[in-house]
Each structure stands twice: as C-alpha cells, then as structure tokens.
Amino acid sequence: MPAPQFDALRQRLAEIYHLAGIAALLEWDFEVMMPPKAAATRGDQMATLHARLHRETTDPEIGQLLDALEKDAASLTEDEAACVREARYDYDRATKLPERLVRELAKAQAEGYTAWEKARAASDFALFRPALERVLELTLESAERFGYKDSPYDALLEKYERGMTAKALRPLFAGLAENQKDLVARITASGHQPDTSWITGTWSREGQERVGRDVLAAMGFDFDGGRLDTAPHPFCTDFGPGDVRLTTRYHEDDPLSALYSSMHEAGHGLYEQGFDLKWSGTPLALAAGLGIHECNSRLWENVVGRSRAFTRFVLPRFRKAFPGRLDAVSEEQWHAAANRVEPSLIRVEADECTYNLHVVIRFEIEVDLIEGRLAVADVPERWNALYREYLGVDVPDAARGCLQDVHWSHALFGYFPTYALGNLYAAQIFEVFLQEHPDFWSDVEEGRFLTLREWLRERIHLVGRRRLGPETVRAISGRAPEPGPYLRYLEEKYTPLYALG
Ligand code: ZN
C-alpha cells in the first residue's frame, strides 16, 4: 500500500506535468499553426502559465511531502523511492534560484534573442556583445547558486546531461576531435566526391511525405498517438501519453533532407511514446537526459537511415513515389549521396563525419567563457581560429561564424555537448544491439525495424529517469561512454565510400 504522502506527492507532480503539457501545446501551436497577429497574446499566455508553473514547482508543500517520505523511506517500493529521489532533485534545483534571478534571466534571454537576431542579420557581433555579456553574468550567478564541485560549467551542463562533467567530457571530446580531424583530412585529400547530379529538379512535397510517413510507420511510430506536421525548424514535443508531435520541413529541391529530419524527430518521438505508462506524470516516465534523447534520434537518422541496408529498403519507395525519376540511380549512388562529407561552416548542415567537430569548438569556447578564461569580446577571433584548426575552413563573416546558433542568447550554456554525446552513445549501444541481433541488417532491407524499437524500449524508454544518460550507456555496454565505438563506426562507413587506404 503506498503511503498517503506518496499519493499526495504524485498528485502534485501530475498537476505540474499537466501544466507543462499545456505549455508545450501552446509552444507547438506557436511554431506550427498560430496566425502571426496572435504573437503578443500568446506571449502573455505563456508568461502567465510559466509563472504559475514556477509557483507550483517550488511550492513548499512539495518540500514538506518529500521530507516526510524521506523519513519513512523504508516503507517505499524501489520505484517509489526512485520517484521520490528524482522529485527531490527537481524540487531542490527549482528552488535554488531566487525569483528575482529567474525574472532577470527571462528578461535578459528575451533581449538576448532580439539582439542576436539583429546582429546576425547585420553580421555584426558588436550588436550582440552587450546582451551576451548580461546573459553570461546572470548565467554565472545561477551556476554559483546551483552549486558545483569542480567547475561552474558542470552546474549548467547538469541541466541537460546530469551525470556528465567538463572533466569527463574533455578526454572524450579530445579523442573525437583528433581522430575525426584526421579522417576529414583523409577524405578531403582523396579528391573523391559522390555524384549528386541526379538530385537536380523538383521533388514534390506530396511524394516525399508519402515515403516519409511509410518509413515512420515501419519504424513503429504510432500515428494514433502522434502527428507529423511541418515547421521552419523541425522539432519533436509531447503533451502527455498518446500525444507526441513531430515536425519536419520539405525542400522541393532535395528529397533526402525531409526524409532524414523526419527520421531524426521520429527517433525522439519513439522515446516519448515508449515511456512507462504506469508512472505517467512522474520523473520515472521522463527522458534520462538530452544526450540519451539525441542518441535515439541519431541512431534512427544516421546509423539506420544512412546505412546501405536502409537504402535497399527506401529507394524502391522513392521510385514508386516519383515514377521514372530514379530508374538510372543505383543504390550505391543514393547511399553515397546520403553520406557525403564536406567540411563546412554551418553546424546544422554538417555531415556525420564533421558534426562533432562543430560541437567540440563550441564546447571549448563556452567552457572558457564560464571558467573566466575568455572574454565575450574575444569570441569571434577564437571561433574563427578553431574553425581553421579543426575544419580547415575560413569563416568569412560572423553570421556564418559565431552568430549562427541561437543557444547562447537563450543562456543555453552546456547544451551543445549533448549533440555529440548523442552520436557517441548511439554508436556504443548499437554495437551491443548488433551483437545480440546479428540479422538486423537483413531485416532492415525488408523494412522490419521493430526489433530495434523494442530493444530501445526495454533498455531505455521504459527505464525513464531511473537511470541517467551516462549510467544507461554503462548499463547497456558495460563501459563508461568512450569515443572508440563512434570512431570505429565512422572508419567502417567512410573507408569504402571514399576509397581510403
Ligand atoms: Zn534531436
């Protein structure tokens, strides 16, 4: 029998969860549906809702319930104890910032965003600098209030990837950077580039959408418990069990882009659809962190979606949706085009081989900003030097340099590493999956993906926050996160594609 206090706690957590679901619905509508004139009203609605959410999350009554439950811990089941532990973490974290700081941060972020947009349009970092300095100042204050052991950066990273630290990331990222830099150099030196001339012309949105929906259904995405819509910047969100929203963006001059962005978002969506329903509304039915979320999306998009076996499955579907257009295009051509490597300036357009290098550059800069070794004014110079060093490209202007990402204007320091961790985790756990399911690739050729979805569901989705990201990787692979599996994966894929010796 659960203690009455535990029921009371669950009730309070459920209310917070529902408010958060409503906020997510309003945000989804803002991105996908809302008419432009609604922006001001929507801003007021969101501010009201978030103030209410903050009050609920930091209500001292939750603290009292947690105190009572912790005193009586012996009477709790293992799951109840995990739920109390996670609710305590959320409560303590939420109550560490005084309301004055929360308000000042929200204001600085809104001003930071406006300044960043102007600065990017004018490609002039000086227009962003004062706003970024203010955001950084408040971010440093919040790091001090959250508390940390080694570096204030850890207090920020914790928001996105609990269980990971700057100290643990450094050797991981150094291993990735050194080897990926070398691989990119060998690919560039090979002088080989795939033939993508067959992509020219118009690819109707209808045809692309038909294939995309087929692929998502084969992956096991439940369309009775979710939707696929379009948005300028694709994302995935959920409002509670049975309502997971994916968005994608169709480019009529490129049939590959929407396919892979849809698979990426559906990878996130399968995670959200796979939570433990018994524990809905509690931390046990929430993601373990952003790294492990990104592990799911990149596993489906890249490891599965850009594989040779998947090409064999998807190419006939495109041939059917675009009659006559792909008759002369071979599997090799499709596969090579889907895995084209090109060192570039823009992170969101980067391929699997160069992507982590973009992340490592941002990590080095933000750690130095947070630990006080770099001034905001010196960010552009440092950025440009690192792009030359890691990717061998010259940054022509700030818009295509340090002003390309929105993150820092929103005070999202510590967020970037989760993208690279997603790649790393995906490769590491997929090695284990393949050992257990050696026939997976022949299943993929025939459109059978459910072994993977079920495996992820059991090892990750149903576990929720009972385990954090790095612990999940260790539990599955028996080893702490390490760069080796991702580097092996890249070598195996790109050596034949680029005829590397
Ligand atoms: Zn993602």
Image (cartoon, grey):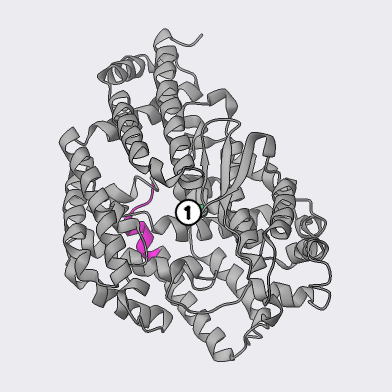
Instruction: Note whether ligand 1 is within 8 Å of mark 1.
Output: no
The kind of residue on which mark 1 rests is Ala
Left or right position of 128 against 283: left
Q: Residue 227, percent across and down?
A: 62, 41
Q: Residue 423, percent across and down?
A: 52, 60
* Relative height, residue 422 to residue 253 (above, below): above
Task: Look at the magenta stretch and give its main secondary structure.
Answer: helix
From where the camera sits, is residue 175 visible? no
Q: Pointer 1: what residue?
A: 480
**The C terminus lies in quadrant:** bottom right
SS class of the residue under badge 1?
loop
Residue 168 highlighted magenta (yes or no) = yes
Q: Which residues are magenta?
A: 163-171
From where the camera sits, is residue 303 visible? yes
Q: Residue 279, percent across and down?
A: 53, 25
At horizontal 20% and vertical 55% (from top left) the residue drawn is 136
